[in-house]
Image (cartoon, rainbow, N blue to C red):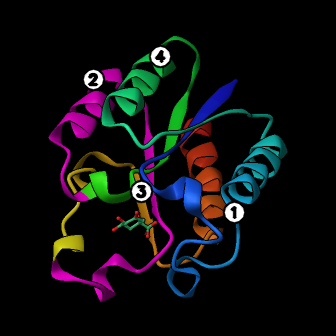
Amino acid sequence: RRILLVNGPNLNLLGTREPEIYGPETLADVEALVERVAGDYGLEVRAVQSNHEGALIDAIHAAREDCLGIVINPGAFTHTSVALRDALTGVALPVAEVHISNVHAREEFRHHSYISGIASCVIVGCGVQGYDFAVRRLAAVLAG
Ligand code: DQA
């Protein structure tokens, strides 16, 4: 029983990137957090981060083989990528969408998400704790 954790572009810079917006935690911290919480539900985690849209799509396709659900922070691709949305729809796994910052309190171009319309849940503005909530919600959805 496994879930896929996907972090999109620039999230490899977590901890150093605009810490006033995204906080001090690193991507390694986020991945460790997700592994710990998922472990509480008997779920393993495959963690992927890429700055390349196609690599994210390939990882999502691969999840169809051996994952039960997806926690994804698509980064800026949230606001641009029909292809990422189609990949998620295509594999038909439950999706928990996470944004560390409150995108609705930021620039207008961050207000629209191509992903939210096909997500099982959307968590914004909770900092990296949003990943914790996302895993718990996904586990509940998977439990039925
Ligand atoms: C983000 C919000 C996006 O608008 C931005 O492009 C990111 C991170 C967030 O986690 O708050 O890269 O997804």
Along the line of sight, the residue nearer the viewer: 117 or 18: 18
Query: Who comes first in sequence, dot 3 or dot 4?
Result: 4
**Mark nearer the N terminus (1 vs 2):** 1
Is 39 on the left or on the right of 130, as rendered?
right
In this rendering, the label closer to the viewer, 1 or 4: 1
Q: Which mark is residue 90?
A: 2
Kind of residue at disc 4: Ala
The stretch of residues the image draws in magenta is 79-108
Residue position marked by numbered label 1 in the rendering: 26
Of labels 1 and 3, earlier in sequence is 1
Q: Nearer the viewer, residue 53 or 132?
A: 53
| Pair 3/4: label in front | 4
Which residue corresponds to the image point at 20% horizontal and 34% vertical from the top-left? 83
As shown in the figure, which amino acid type bears the numbered disc 1? Answer: Thr
Q: Which mark is first along the chain, 2 or 3?
A: 2
* SS under mark 2: helix
Verify CB contact (< 8 Å) between mark 3 and mark 4. Answer: no
Name the residue beneath numbered marker 4. 62
Q: Amino acid at mark 2?
A: Gly
Residue 97 drawn at (x, y percent): 42, 54
Residue 84: x and y in percent read 27, 37
Q: Is residue 93 magenta?
A: yes
Is the C terminus in the top left, top right, bottom left or bottom right quadrant? top right
Residue 90 drawn in magenta: yes
Callout 1–callout 3 Cβ contact below 8 Å? no
Crowdedness near tag 1: few (<14), some (14–19) or many (≥20) residues, C-alpha within 10 Å: some
Q: Nearer the viewer, mark 1 or mark 2?
A: 1
Task: Tell which quarter ligand 1 is in.
Answer: bottom left
